[in-house]
């Protein structure tokens, strides 16, 4: 039984730490631990330039589940800081995160991309990110969060799909499905399309918004545009 903080399932920390392939697929499964009031028990945690990558046409699947404790900040998948990234060269990328926590626990995000972290499918790869906030009585159990400048969920040319479900139970509030703030970005490059689905938490508290985008330069966008005679236009 672990009563201290930071009981991560998989930790990839600093620029010299990588999980990668030379063209094959990469499959990652991380389960956060901890017990009692332990905080910050992430399923999969990339920090200080840590990277999960696949070269060539290799695909990436990352699945993380946060720790089931009364403490806060039990993220499913957490990509934090500049040069921390989950990235393919030409293959598809799928990231799935389940925030957990229990009882009065708060801030249990499914997927958190923060402080310059990136999830990116390069080349012709498509990207899918699915996140569910923790079912706890505390507030701020987001499905997916993209927070602070240069934090991105994006592609070079493929399609991007983001699906976020806010958590929370009882009177818990502010459980956003998909959250982008302070220049966080969800985007697709080239001819890629962007689909974002956000559902606010089902708890009785206030502020359970499906999709929340706030502050200048926070955005959900694609670069592709139809011709002027087309009935549909995406920006």
Image: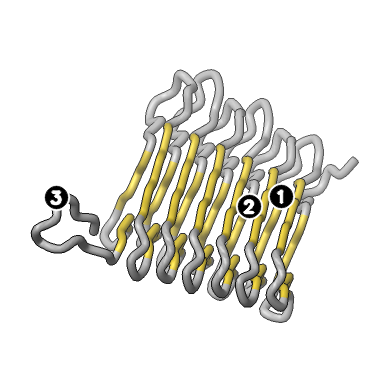
Front: mark 2 or 3: 3
Residue linked to disc 2: 77
- Depth check, front residue: 183 or 86: 86
- Look at 71% across and 63% down and name the residue there: 26
Residue linked to disc 3: 231
> Of marks 2 and 3, which one's residue comes earlier in the chain?
2
Residue linked to disc 1: 43
From this viewpoint, which residue is outermost toward the left?
A: 229
Neighbours of disc 1 within 10 Å: few (<14), some (14-19), many (20+): many
> Seen in the image, is 216 located left or right of residue 56?
left
- Depth check, front residue: 93 or 163: 93
From this viewpoint, which residue is outermost toward the right?
A: 1
Residue 93, horizontal then vertical, whole percent? 57, 60
Depicted 11 relative to depicted 97: above or below = below
> Of marks 3 and 1, which one's residue comes earlier in the chain?
1
- Depth check, front residue: 43 or 205: 43
Q: How far apart, in angstroms, are the residues tagged by discs 2 and 3?
A: 38 Å
Residue 230, horizontal then vertical, whole percent? 14, 55
Q: How far apart, in angstroms, are the residues tagged by discs 2 and 1?
A: 6 Å
Residue 135, horizontal then vertical, whole percent? 60, 29
- Label 3: which secondary element: loop
Neighbours of disc 3 within 10 Å: few (<14), some (14-19), many (20+): few
Give yes or no for contact between labels 2 and 1 (Cβ–Cβ under 8 Å): yes
**Quadrant in the picture for residue 69:** top right
Residue 206, horizontal then vertical, whole percent? 39, 26
> Of marks 2 and 1, which one's residue comes earlier in the chain?
1
Q: How far apart, in angstroms, are the residues tagged by discs 3 and 1?
A: 43 Å
- Depth check, front residue: 104 or 112: 112
- Look at 65% across and 71% down and name the residue there: 54
Determine if residue 62 is in view.
yes
Neighbours of disc 2 within 10 Å: few (<14), some (14-19), many (20+): many
From this viewpoint, which residue is outermost toward the bottom?
A: 16
């Amino acid at each position: 039984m672990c009563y201290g903080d930071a009981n991560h399932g998989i930790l990839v920390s600093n620029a010299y730490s990588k999980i990668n392939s030379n063209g094959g697929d990469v499959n990652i499964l991380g389960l956060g631990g901890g017990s009692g009031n332990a905080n910050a028990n992430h399923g999969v945690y990339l920090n200080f330039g840590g990277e999960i990558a696949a070269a060539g046409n290799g695909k990436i699947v990352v699945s993380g589940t946060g720790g089931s404790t009364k403490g806060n900040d039990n993220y499913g998948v957490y990509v934090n800081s500049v040069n921390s990234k989950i990235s393919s060269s030409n293959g598809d990328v799928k990231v799935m995160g389940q925030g957990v926590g229990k009882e009065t626990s708060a801030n249990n995000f499914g997927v958190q991309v923060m402080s310059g972290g990136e999830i990116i499918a390069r080349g012709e790869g498509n990207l899918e990110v699915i996140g569910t906030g923790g079912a706890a009585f505390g507030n701020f159990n987001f499905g997916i969060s993209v927070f602070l400048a240069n934090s991105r969920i994006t592609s070079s040319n493929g399609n991007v799909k983001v699906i976020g479900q806010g958590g929370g139970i009882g009177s818990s509030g502010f459980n956003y499905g998909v959250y982008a703030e302070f220049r966080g970005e969800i985007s697709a490059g080239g001819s890629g399309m962007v689909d974002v689905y956000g559902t606010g938490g089902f708890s009785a508290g206030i502020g359970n918004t499906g999709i929340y985008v706030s502050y200048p330069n926070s955005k959900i966008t694609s670069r592709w545009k139809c011709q002027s005679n087309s009935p549909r236009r995406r920006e």
